[in-house]
Image: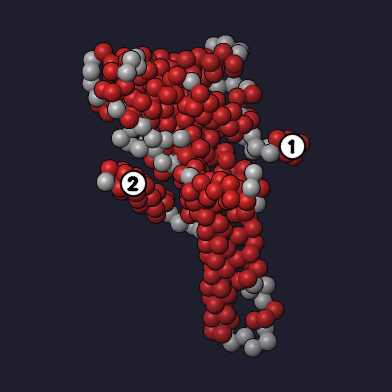
Amino acid sequence: MDIRSIKSFLVKSLVSDSVKLVLALLAVFFLFVVAVGAQKGLAARAENQKVLAELNQAGAPAAKPAGDNRLQDPWREGWDGAMRFLSGRNLETIARQTTIVGLAALGMTLVIIAGGIDLSVGSAVALATIVIAWFLGRMPSPSIAAILAVATCALFGLLSGLAITRLRVVPFIVTLGMMLLVRGAAKGLSHEQKIDAPETWLNGLLASLLPEQRWMLVPVGVWVLIAMAMVTALVLRYTKLGRHAFALGSNEQTARLCGVAVDRVKLGIYTLCGAFAGLAGVMQFSRLTVGDPTVANGLELDVIAAVVIGGGSLSGGEGSVLGSLAGALIMTVIRSGCSQMGMPNWVQEIITGIIIIAAVALDRRRHRRAAE
């Protein structure tokens, strides 16, 4: 391989959408490293000014303020704040917080690539926690409880697919109704209460690593996300289902004329989306350790946002697993950074909303340029 071919490969790699997203993620992360450090330093300086003002009012000698224990070094405080955001513990926390949205986003990636949408994933996550807690109270096997939770959510995904393909109702309406149906089923099964469950190994899937577990780098749940992401990427790239999903999202009528079993593909995709939502529910149960019918309210918006920020097109035909995971990580980094800077939750929501609008606007602009 000569220098020219290497240069061409590097240029193509740098302009690819996936690499751009990873670079954007790194840029956002280090932006918050600097921002958190600056905020901590400015906060220390402001606190010093208050202390000095109090000492001046009390008539303290000029030499005394320098020895006051309340005074802080703004540079050191800023550096320590930046290093805390950059620490391995914070990176582990970000990975844990991304897992639930990331798993649900894998299924949503398949749906959006195929030109659909699924608004029921948040309700499916809540139902999964209820199913696990309910079965754990009646049988000693956490593995069976987790499998039944995933299977239950996959069944509701299949029902969504059947309603879309048999009743010929648009996915938005079907999954909107399924969102209410599944949430109601979770509340009915739990009698609108949280269900306590005995402690099992499921509780440790997303728990912070103990000192003797540091060799794992991240909790088991994060490794599950990585494994599922690799499987989903292979499905999209090398299987008939993946190729047909892209064809379906690009032009459903053309795909049908080319012999694609459109209804069968939709059934498979919505079933997989439900299964991934169920797996996300298993991780949600690990964080809560109880079954909660009200949890994950609005989670579907975070999941859709992760896919859209990651380059998925709501028009269908575009999307990637790496992009969706990068989108989920970007949202988590923003929330973590805003939280460590002491920003209220409503500021985080505004920033996330702006990013979603910008991502969709860029997608539309890209489509218009491609059409010209």
Q: Please give left or right for residue 107 compared with residue 369 in the image.
A: right
Residue 5, which numbered label?
none
Q: Residue at x 68, y 87 (%)?
A: 63
Q: Is residue 77 above or below residue 100?
A: below
Q: Camera-side residue: 117 or 243?
A: 243
Q: Count neighbours of disc 2 (C-alpha within 10 A) and say few if under 14, some if 14 to 19, many if 20 or more.
A: few
Question: Which image quadrant is residue 93 in?
Answer: top right
The colour scheme is: secondary structure
Q: Camera-side residue: 315 or 371?
A: 371
Which element type, helix, strand or loop, lies under badge 2?
helix
- The residue tagged 1 is 215
Q: Is residue 105 above or below residue 178?
A: below
Q: Please give left or right for residue 315 compared with residue 242 in the image.
A: left
**Residue 333 placed where, x, y %?**
51, 49
Which element type, helix, strand or loop, lies under badge 1?
helix
N-terminal label among 2 and 1: 1
Q: Can residue 308 be seen here? A: yes
- The residue tagged 2 is 366
Label 2–label 1 contact, CB within 8 A: no
Q: Please give left or right for residue 296 compared with residue 279 in the image.
A: left
**Residue 245 placed where, x, y %?**
39, 24
Q: Residue at x 60, y 48 (%)?
A: 6
**Residue 274 placed where, x, y %?**
42, 22
Of circles 2 and 1, the one toward us is 2
Q: Count neighbours of disc 1 (C-alpha within 10 A) and say few if under 14, some if 14 to 19, many if 20 or more.
A: few
Q: Residue furthest right?
A: 212
Q: Camera-side residue: 26 or 172?
A: 26
Amino acid type, mark 2? Arg
Q: Please give left or right for residue 141 compared with residue 155 in the image.
A: right
Q: Residue at x 49, y 27 (%)?
A: 237
**Residue 314 placed where, x, y %?**
32, 36
